[in-house]
Amino acid sequence: MEFQYLLHHLRLSSSSEEEPLPSHALPPITELLSLLSRKLIGSAEAFCECSSLIGQLQHLFQAGDPDWLLTPAVDAVNGWAELRSAYCSLISALIGCAVLPLCEDDCSALDAAAYQSVPERAAAVCSALTALLGNWTEESGAKRGETGLTGLLLAVAPPICLFSVTHFQDQAWTSATSRAAARRLHQALLRAGGWSGPAHLLMGDQRTGEGGILDGVLQILQPQLTRDSWRRREDVKLLFSWTLLQVTRPFLAPSLPRLLPPSLLLNDDYRPENCMLGVRCLHHIVLNTPAADLRQFNRAEVLYQALFKHLYTSEAAVVQLALSCLLDLLPVLEKPPSSSCRTKPCRHDDVLRLVLTHMEAEHKVALRRVYASALPLFVERMGVASCRHLRRLERVLLGYLEVRDPPEETSRLKMLEVLQKTTAVAWPRMACRVDRFLRCLLRLLVDVSSDASLGEPVRQQLMDQTAAALRLLDGCSQGRVQRLLLQVDGLCCSSQVLSCLATVTAEATGTPGTSGGGDGLG
């Protein structure tokens, strides 16, 4: 009887009697949903009325018979289409009650006060939608397997998924209560469709031929991801990036025409946080798209130009992400110089040249660490072709090894790694530079041994890497380093330095070119 009183209170029946409707006189579900949609749209601005209506709607989904809620009035194709349309309209109206306000323009963001009423509304909507999805989990296996019911779930899943993702993130428009409600809604959606996780929800299962909701999600997001509109809604970029990062091979390539343009829009934004989000999206695309698809329509070249320009920025986080993405993109555009006999400069040279140019004059610690961390990977990729940049590389190595970088000494350790890699592949060109590097490395050993602020593990690592670099230099100079080390005055050095130098003279090897450096002589 409570259910009948609820229907009567909602005035969803055409009857004007004061008594509640008998059970056999329930209105058609499509009629009920249409009336509820209109009521929600009409009360969206009035918070109290809207909240009350959402609460009553939640009770209706909890008390209603799933057979009545999820079965069309006429069991036919048109009946299921009508039911899908009614539910989509209702869910759209529900979500509209907690929609985020638009920014006044595309240059400024809203403050937290603008979202004051959103968390409470969102929590109520999440609870109502969770109650609705609970009817799917209560259905029997045979009933849930019906084509019409499956189509109904796939139709309502995209907007529900996006709504839950909007509100389970820690943002200005969420609270602890609304985030918990959104997470419950997301889990209810996964249970309703038997999906194992967000990736399965979006992509489906290739083995069984089961489709996902990616197309439906992109259909909702695309109108909001235009150049003139995406900045007006703070949640759109987060929804798009969340969606994209769930999609992997082989499902990403077919949707690339719809995923690449918004990623480039984010990448080109002047705000560092948006730019970083865009670079992450582009990197995910590079990692999860076949090289042939990236080269098609010159997409890879467009990506390269979009990322290369970030090397001119002073934002360390942006530069770090751009360099990481470029390392994975460049092999798509061309063979690595270390694996080919090409003698002409290529894009790898362009990136390394610009990085070294910036490193020479860079004084910001964060950027110095970013460049230093990326340099060993580029030198390894370049191989013997790094000889083309040896003069500039020498200046960078000498400059960075002389400057402290406490407490982890990241820059110095990376420069020692670069020196070792360069000596191993370009050893014929390093013999004439031994004297300069030897003086620098000896000063480094003395500085490290006398620096009381360094932790013992970091100090030991620096001294070990320095000794390894000295052994390589000794090998490429036919023992010259050993002969010069004999001239070091032991009274001017600590016992640690002398012990380190002793390991160099004791473990010095022959010319590296005798085993693996033959291709460096070409």
Image (tube, helix red, strand yellow):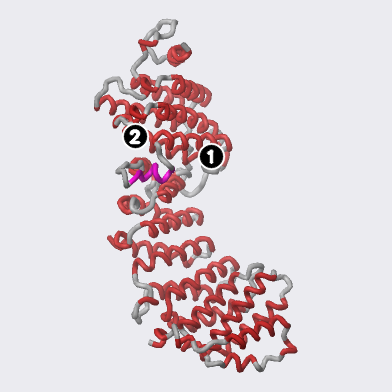
Check disc 2 and report the residue beneath it.
Answer: 155
Left or right: 263, with 471 as reference point: left
Q: Is 453 above or below relative to 491?
A: above
Check disc 1 and report the residue beneath it.
Answer: 173
The answer to whether residue 412 of the structure is visible from this angle is: yes
Secondary structure type for disc 1? loop
Q: Is 132 above or below relative to 358?
A: above
Q: Which residues are magenta?
A: 197-205
Q: Amino acid at mark 1?
A: Trp
Q: Is 58 above or below relative to 273?
A: above
- Classify residue 220 by image quadrant: top left
Q: Is 452 above or below relative to 428?
A: above
Secondary structure type for disc 2? helix
* Residue at 52% across, 34% down: 181
Q: Nearer the viewer, residue 204 or 309?
A: 204
**Which disc, if any, is residue 445?**
none
Q: Could you tell me residue 337's position as x and y percent?
A: 38, 76
